[in-house]
Image (tube, rainbow, N blue to C red):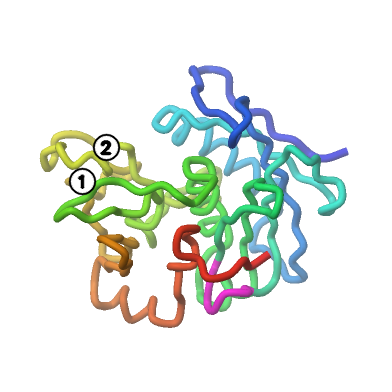
Amino acid sequence: MPAAVQPSTTHPVHGAAFGTGGVPTIAIVNLATVPLGYDLKKLVAAMQLALDKYFVPVWGAPAMLKIFPDKKSIPATAWPFLFVDDADVAGALGYHDLTKNGVPVTFVFVKTTLGDGADVAVTASHELWEMLIDPGIQMWADGPNGQLWAYEMADAVEETDFLVDEVRISNFVYPSFFELFRKPKSTKFDQLALVDRPFKLLKGGYTIIKKGAGTKQLFGSAAKKKRFAKEDRRLHRSAIRKKKHH
């Protein structure tokens, strides 16, 4: 039987599974041949707690995280969330996509993440936040200067995280981050309160913007741009993805 972590029922929830309604089940399978850096059950429990306690009250997107022994045991309606060894996109630590049947799926590349000096739990929670809010990888927000900003929950605040039961969890932006009418310092824009105005990138953050037919990446600092040079995360956006990776 798969191990399950029950979501909290202490606050109202308004999320819906992609295209069907209801609360999605995130089916977690560890296919990596190297240690994650955490016990899988502890990692998943911390992600569920962070989801229920911090993310759902802000975004209203609940989910039930369950550990399954292999891919064959994943129910057809569940969203696969797979820990695997190596990236199939140059330098990618993780990404979320859609299966051929239109089911959201996430990949966390364990060897690639560890080789980059990053934390597997941070990568996993980063992808979880973004999978839950934009499972179709298609949403954009009206940003400054007539630009469209990719509607991603963790990219702008990347390289910042917080602890939940000794597990590092990715920071995430609030809906107010994408509300251009908000004045600086008028409200909270991210979980760690590091952003002071809408559409602001932290030094370790980045975003994809679209204006007209073109897209490009913006970075929070020159150092981030340099670190990012080995990876092309434009492929995370379905509108400009040149191939399927799964």
The mark that comes first in sequence, 2 or 1, is: 2
76 lies left or right of 229: right
Callout 1: SS = loop
Callout 2: SS = helix
Residue 77, numbered label: none
* Quadrant occupied by the C terminus: bottom right
- Residue 30 drawn at (x, y percent): 75, 58
- Residue 15 drawn at (x, y percent): 52, 28
Residue at x 86% of width, y 46% of height? 73
| Residue sitting farthest toward the left | 183
37 lies left or right of 151: right
Tell me which corner region of the image, top left, top right, bottom left or bottom right, holds residue 18.
Answer: top right
- Distance from Cα at disc 2 to Cα at disc 1: 7 Å
- Residue 187 drawn at (x, y percent): 20, 34
> What's under tag 1, amino acid-wise?
Pro
Residue 198, numbered label: 1
- Residue 109 drawn at (x, y percent): 62, 67
In-front residue for pair 80/168 = 80
Residue at x 22% of width, y 50% of height? 143
Tell me which corner region of the image, top left, top right, bottom left or bottom right, holds residue 33.
Answer: bottom right
Answer whether residue 5 is magenta in the image: no
Q: Is residue 72 above or below residue 89?
A: above
Bounds of the magenta span? 87-93
| Dominant SS type (magenta) | loop
Residue at x 40% of width, y 52% of height? 154
Residue 176, numbered label: 2
| Residue sitting farthest toward the front | 213
Crowding at dot 1, Cα within 10 Å, few <14 / some 14-19 / many 20+, comes out as many
Asked whether the beta carbons under mark 2 and mark 1 sit within 8 Å of each other, the answer is: yes
> What's under tag 2, amino acid-wise?
Ser
